Image (spheres, rainbow, N blue to C red):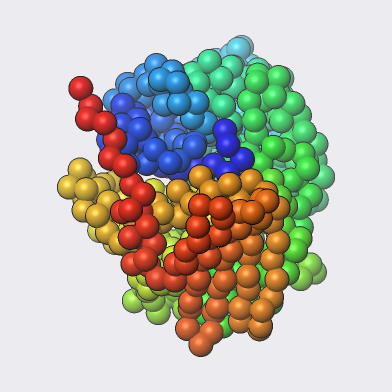
Amino acid sequence: MSARGVDLLVYADRLGGDLPRLRSLLDGPFRDFAGVHILPFFVPFDGADAGFDPIDHAAVDPRLGAWDDVRAIAGDSGNGREVTADLIVNHVSSASAEFVDWLAHGDASAHDGMFLAFDTVFPDGANEHDITAFYRPRPGLPFTAYRMADGRRRLVWTTFMPSQIDLDVRNERARDYLRRILAALRAGGVTTVRLDAVGYAVKTPGSDSFMTAETLVFVREIVAMAREAGLRVLVEVHAHYSQQLAIAPLVDLVYDFALAPLLLHSLGTGTSDRLVEWFRIRPQNAVTVLDTHDGIGIIDAGPSGDRPGLIDQDEMAAIFERAAVATGGHSTIASVVPAWMSLPHQINATFFSALGADANAYLLARAVQLWLPGQPQLYYVGLLGGLDDVELFRRTGQGRDVNRHVYTPEELEAALTSEVTRAQLALVRLRSTNPAFGGRFGFRSLAEAAVELEWRLGDERASLTVSFAPAPAFRIDIDGPAGSFSLDTVASLAALWERTHIPPSPTP
């Protein structure tokens, strides 16, 4: 994959409908994307947690396609596209064959020891302080009682949902399970695995059990397992920025989750100092995102315990308040406050909605994302200029569903004609094809509210200047032997896409 490449993050069923039709989009209007992260397409893709509760993690849900379709997306057609898939490290479904067998046969099960029971972590029992010390991203306690076939009741760890049974990742049977899944993914054409929820995978009494020293030991071990299978590793950790910096050297890629809240802070306050400080220290092997299927993480830029954040608690609260105003109060309803916390850890809203559908501010933020070093990734709802799907949230009661719209063919066609989408596609094309992005990166503060980001390679130059006050503004300057041009509006970016867009050949 080109070092300048941009990735798309998508659910196969919610954009296109299945894997073959997703491939058609990637070969057609989205062909400038060098890679795609396909969110869980396993059996079933539409479980209680939208595929993050697999019954069979090694099988493609036949309603979406087959492993041949994943391999075709990856490059059987010769396009060499990177494919990322999730390795769900922390848990399996309560309906998985392994867990069902354990409930039926207990100690005699071939999977005994694979699942994390309460007394595995607390063999001598636990008091109130021990239990409430654990960090959980949802309200309530992380345990669920299950009845064995012989009538015994076992209290198992369920960090996220009662139907998501935590693995005992220190147990060899659990590790054999993970090795089997890694092998299936690699054989299916996957090139990179995202370690989903790895920060919660190791429970250590006496700590909050989130991204501890013991977690980092396991990260090294699971990364070694993935690389042995021939896979690159992307780690997902919503945590204090120092933990991102600590884990970045251990993996191939780490998310830059701090960028989105810092951009919201800058756009809301008309200042750039916190953003510039992050530019100075952020990991270079980062996947840059504004929005994902999990909402907009705010905790990633904030304080944790006695560690100061890139922004403080009041500034975090102000971001939530501005989002509430922009969404008519809906983001407050949809966002969840974790156990023992005073604020949600993320805004459940589309990034466009959180900015009040201000296209100029939105393209400013997207341009910053695509100008930073690392591997940019655009979420399908964000690419299509999606606003909150309030109706889907009402039907499911899941706050994150406001940002998981299921596009009909008609909605997709309409979105592809919008200025917001075409302007973003123009940015993707610039990042993917302009030689300057293969050179050296630099940035500088121009004033309290303005920043310049620049790439240079020989005579090629790609510069982005953004200003957050008195109103959001951006200017792109492209210079090179082939000529120079500037862009400073959403319309001018969309027009660039129109000028450089070559329709794909008709499908036979």
Q: Nearer the viewer, residue 69 or 301?
A: 69
* Residue at image location 35% in from the left, 32% down from the top: 27
Taking the image as shown, residue 92 lies to the left or right of residue 385, namely right
Q: Is residue 338 above or below residue 27?
A: below
Q: Quadrant of residue 20?
A: top left
- Image quadrant where one finds the C terminus: top left
Residue shown at 50%/21% (left/top)? 189
The answer to whether residue 354 of the structure is visible from this angle is: no
Measured as percent of width and height from the top left, residue 260 is found at 55, 63
Q: Quadrant of residue 113?
A: top right
Q: Is residue 270 visible?
A: yes
- Residue lying at the far left of the rendered structure: 410
Q: Splitting the image into 4 quarters, where does residue 216 fall?
A: top right
Q: Is residue 145 left or right of residue 252?
A: left
Taking the spot 53% from the left edge, 48% from the top edge, the residue there is 434
Relative image position of residue 259 (x, y in whole percent): 60, 62
Q: In x, y percent, where is residue 338?
A: 56, 60
Q: Where is the N terminus found, in terms of image quarters?
A: top right
**Residue 6 placement, left or right of 251:** left
Please tell me whether residue 48 is drawn above or below residue 453 in the rendered image: above
The percent coordinates of residue 300 (x first, y second) are 64, 61
On screen, residue 411 versus residue 147, left or right, reads left
Residue at image location 66% in from the left, 83% down from the top:
447
